[in-house]
Amino acid sequence: MIKIPVIQTLFDGHNDLLSQMAAGKCCLQDVRDGYGAGHIDLPRARQGGFGGGFFAIFVEDSSDDLGNVLAATQHPPYHLDIPPEVPHHTALPVALHQAAEMQRLHRAGIVHLCTDTATLEAKLHAPDVLAAVL
């Protein structure tokens, strides 16, 4: 009897690649070619069995220091106050900029933007692109 190894494909429930790109912390070429300091890049994703995930659009309240917020989530009791609402006129351009980064990744063939489960299933196991849900 021949045993065929089971290949597990990982699906990430949340990543911040789009906000990192929009903030100029990485670029499309970094994601395509690899840059060890970031959240996700294609070479490391493929090496680790990462098939895709949810790509978050995140708009932060500019009065909060993100470093302080992230530090507060690292140690118990994980208590964070609900931040103030970000006004629509401030949030919309930030969200659209991050959505545009997703479109750039899609057009470059790095990710495939999946809008239904059949496409997600097909692209999750594709060898050349990451399945992305916005």
Image (cartoon, helix red, strand yellow):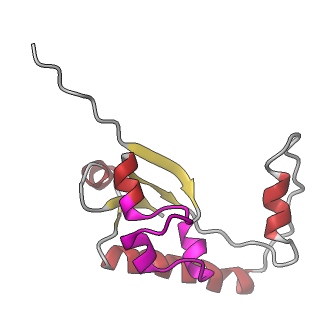
**Residue at position x 40%, y 55% from top?**
45
Q: Residue at x 17, y 20 (%)?
A: 3
Pick whichever, 29 or 78, lies toward us. 29
Residues in magenta, as a range:
17-43
User: In the rendered image, is residue 50 in sight?
Assistant: no
Vertical relation: 89 (above or below) 55: below
Quadrant for the N terminus, please: top left
Foreground residue among 96 and 39:
39
The residue positioned 48% from the left and 80% from the top of the image is 27
Residue at the far front in the pictured view: 36
The residue depicted at 59 percent of the width and 73 percent of the height is 20
Q: Quadrant of residue 9?
A: top left
Is 83 placed left or right of 50 in the picture?
Answer: right
Residue 72 relative to residue 56: left or right: right
Vertical relation: 115 (above or below) 1 = below
Q: Is residue 46 visible?
A: yes
Image location (x, y in percent) of residue 18: 54, 72
Task: Residue 99 in the image: state x and y as whole percent.
Answer: 50, 76
Q: Total number of numbered labels? A: 0
Where's residue 103, x and y in %?
40, 78
Measured as percent of width and height from the top left, residue 8 is found at 34, 36
The image quadrant that residue 97 belongs to is: bottom right
104 drawn magenta: no
Question: In the current view of this chain or complex, which residue is farthest to the left?
Answer: 1
Q: Is residue 25 magenta?
A: yes
In the rendered image, the vertical position of residue 93 relative to residue 75, given as above or below: below
